[in-house]
């Protein structure tokens, strides 16, 4: 978005915003030379940043009250996209000194600070004001079309360079901006957009910007969806709670909007769930690792509730309420807008502005205390929920402490007898394979690299841990053994720095029982050792299902499709080759298991990622109540798109 030049910006405050306010900085060559500096990289995330940048401009226009409808069209080729809005239209008049239209300047000049320097804040997108010119520089083709003042205007660019001038293409009614672009394949190794990523972003944007209608036309999948949330983040909260399958314990959620420099918008509700769930955003950007805004929210909740409990003497004797008890079952959406957000952490998804903590705290705390005091029956339900959490914690505590005693790093470790540990002390190089059954365990034990690979066989079915409290989970011997082998503890005693391996690999047969076990284990990790999944420590091993022998060569196929693909590549049909179908890991020779499944050089490994929190919650919650064949589908279909292949 354009940068305002000081004196002119002042004149433009009343909303008059013409070409004169746009300060010109520099050309676009640096963007093409070092795209990573502007969009973070050229992988999938970088590619999708282009969409967010263009989308943000339309969202800004909507946020400022000028646009109501936004349409994003992913074109049939999957590699080009159009974003259009019904806002005022980018100004097409000429800049007095530069002799160029505002539109041309917006698309061809790099705007360093962007709107952050003014009173406005940017709404969304990961790149903080780099804007449309960056997208233009990285597109083989970009066409901007503007309707305003009774005419339609168009300007075309190739790799950021204008192709002729701004042309009036006809008469038009109304106003708006449409931007078509096609990412440059000489910059991006893959130029195909992922419809599901775009869809999720648009849906979230519609929640964060109440009342804005966002339509997604997904041509490759022939889908057309409209997102519009009349209640904004309150609708989002409702959807999160429903998709996680939890029941709220009181009716109306708490909501608050406060704007005083920065803007904070928050809603929350207590549920029957045993964990806490906060979805937070800064300027529309998801902050998956939280940060100062979340800290402010947490401290406000803790203090307000505790104050209420004390004032009304509601705590039973002998029960102490911890901050975690207070937030058990707490589900919230928190969205803040601020002028200069600073992000931190490996994935830059943690807010680091210290002043925001106190800002959120002081906005939420008094409002929540007031709300509790004026909704006494709701407050009572919440307090009863919290007291229950404290009692359950005391019970769980005993169970997890028993496990932790065994995993304590000081003193002797009492590892489970079934674990065949690895010998290396270099944790970065070690892996734990969790395998199904003793016979598979035996082959894995013999076939592995003993120095770096440990094997833990699990016998029989693993407990379904969806909606089971920790104390119950730990009564299950298989899972308790697993936690001891991992070494990182669980629940309140969880400490990732004590994880004994660099990777945890789930390895089950390529059949429906195997997939069922993998699903149960993934549910356990997702619900009770969430941090391991979040930090990318959990993997799914992919054993072959078929061995294909052709003359002296051997190929391995992981499923039917893979087999068909290999045969096609070889130009053979099934009758000309020798095909063996494996019944299970247990019947594979240790050496074969090593080559196909264990060896880091030749195996396939899928990293389990939490790509789309909303979807994952819903899928796990739905599947765990259904029959194994459906769960099998889940693994086959979702392991692949939830995943990073080949580590
Ligand atoms: C600068 C000034 C004005 C509008 C816009 C930019 C604008 C940019 C984009 C990008 C996508 N959609 C957009 N809609 C508007 C205001 C011009 C005026 O005062 O009429």
Image: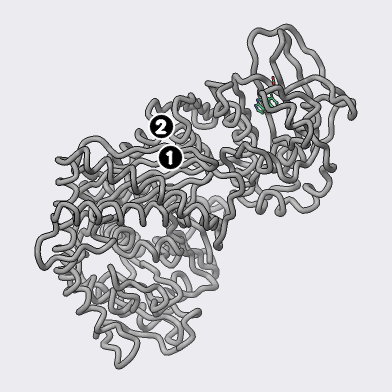
Q: Nearer the viewer, mark 1 or mark 2?
A: 1
Quarter that holds the N terminus: top right
Up-down relation of residue 433 to residue 423 (above or below): above
- Which residue is disc 2 drawn over? 232
Number of dots carrying numbers = 2
State ligand 1's quadrant: top right
Q: How far apart, in angstroms, are the residues tagged by discs 1 and 2?
A: 10 Å
Disc 2 CB within 8 Å of nearest ligand 1 atom? no
Q: Is residue 405 above or below residue 367?
A: below
Q: Which disc is residue 601 wearing?
A: none
Q: 170 left or right of 498?
A: right
Q: Say few, some or many: other residues with alpha carbon within 10 Å of mark 1 (under 14 / 14 to 19 / 20 or more).
A: many
Marks 1,2: beta carbons within 8 A: yes
Name the image quarter holding residue 303.
bottom left
Residue 628: percent from left, percent from top:
23, 51
The residue under the point 82% across, 24% down is 101
Question: What residue would you read off at disc 1?
Answer: 265
């Amino acid at each position: 978005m354009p940068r305002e030049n000081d004196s002119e910006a002042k004149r433009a405050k009343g909303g008059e915003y013409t070409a004169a306010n746009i300060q010109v900085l520099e050309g676009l060559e640096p963007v093409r030379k070092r795209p990573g500096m502007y969009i973070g990289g050229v992988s999938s995330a970088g590619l999708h940043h282009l969409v967010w940048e263009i989308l943000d401009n339309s969202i800004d226009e909507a946020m400022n009250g000028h646009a109501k409808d936004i349409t994003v069209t992913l074109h049939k080729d999957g590699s080009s996209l159009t974003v259009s809005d019904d806002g005022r239209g980018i100004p097409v008049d000429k800049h007095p000194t530069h002799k160029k239209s505002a539109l041309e300047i917006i698309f061809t000049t790099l705007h360093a600070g962007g709107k952050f320097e003014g009173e406005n804040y940017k709404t969304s997108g990961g790149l903080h004001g780099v804007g449309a010119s960056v997208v233009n520089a990285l597109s083989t083709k970009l066409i901007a079309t503007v309707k305003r003042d009774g005419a339609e205007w168009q300007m075309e660019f190739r790799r950021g360079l204008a192709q002729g001038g701004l042309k009036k293409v006809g008469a038009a009614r109304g106003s708006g901006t449409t931007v078509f672009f096609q990412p440059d394949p000489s910059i991006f190794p893959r130029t195909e957009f992922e419809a599901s990523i775009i869809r999720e972003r648009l849906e979230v944007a519609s929640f964060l910007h109440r009342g804005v209608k966002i339509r997604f036309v997904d041509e490759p999948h022939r889908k057309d969806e409209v997102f519009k949330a009349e209640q904004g983040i309150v609708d989002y909260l409702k959807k999160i709670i429903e998709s996680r399958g939890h029941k709220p314990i009181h009716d109306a959620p708490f909501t608050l909007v406060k704007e005083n420099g920065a803007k904070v918008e928050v809603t929350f509700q207590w549920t029957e769930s045993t964990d806490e769930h906060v979805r937070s955003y800064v300027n529309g950007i998801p902050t998956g690792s939280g940060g100062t805004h979340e800290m402010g929210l947490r401290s406000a909740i803790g203090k307000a509730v505790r104050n209420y409990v004390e004032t009304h003497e509601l705590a039973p004797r002998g029960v102490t309420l911890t901050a975690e008890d207070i937030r058990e079952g707490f589900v919230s959406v928190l969205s803040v807008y601020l002028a200069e957000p600073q992000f931190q952490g490996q994935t830059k998804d943690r807010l680091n502005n210290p002043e925001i903590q106190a800002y959120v705290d002081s906005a939420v705390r008094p409002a929540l205390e007031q709300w509790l005091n004026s909704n006494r029956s709701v407050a009572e339900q919440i307090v009863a929920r919290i007291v229950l959490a404290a009692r359950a914690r005391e019970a769980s505590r005993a169970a997890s402490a028993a496990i932790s005693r065994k995993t304590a790093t000081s003193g002797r470790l009492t590892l489970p007898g079934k674990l065949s540990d690895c010998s290396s002390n270099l944790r970065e190089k070690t892996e734990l394979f969790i395998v199904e059954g003793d016979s598979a365990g035996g082959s894995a034990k013999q076939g592995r690299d003993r120095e770096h690979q440990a094997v833990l066989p699990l016998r029989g079915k693993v407990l379904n841990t969806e909606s089971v409290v920790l104390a119950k989970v730990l009564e299950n011997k298989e899972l308790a053994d697993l936690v001891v082998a991992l070494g990182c503890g669980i629940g309140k005693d969880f400490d990732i720095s004590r994880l004994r391996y660099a990777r945890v690999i789930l390895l089950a047969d390529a059949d429906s029982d195997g997939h069922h076990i993998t699903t149960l284990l993934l549910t356990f990790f997702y619900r009770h050792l969430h941090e391991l999944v979040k930090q990318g420590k959990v993997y799914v091993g992919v054993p072959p299902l078929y061995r294909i022998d052709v003359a002296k060569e051997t190929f391995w196929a992981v499923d039917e499709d893979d087999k068909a693909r290999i045969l096609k590549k070889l130009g053979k049909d099934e009758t000309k080759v020798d095909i063996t179908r494996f019944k299970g890991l247990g019947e594979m020779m240790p050496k074969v298991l090593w080559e196909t499944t264990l060896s880091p050089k030749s195996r396939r490994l899928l990293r389990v990622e939490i790509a789309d929190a909303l979807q994952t919650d819903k899928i796990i919650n739905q599947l765990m109540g259904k029959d194994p064949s459906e769960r099998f589908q889940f693994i086959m279909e979702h392991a692949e798109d939830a995943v990073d292949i080949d580590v």
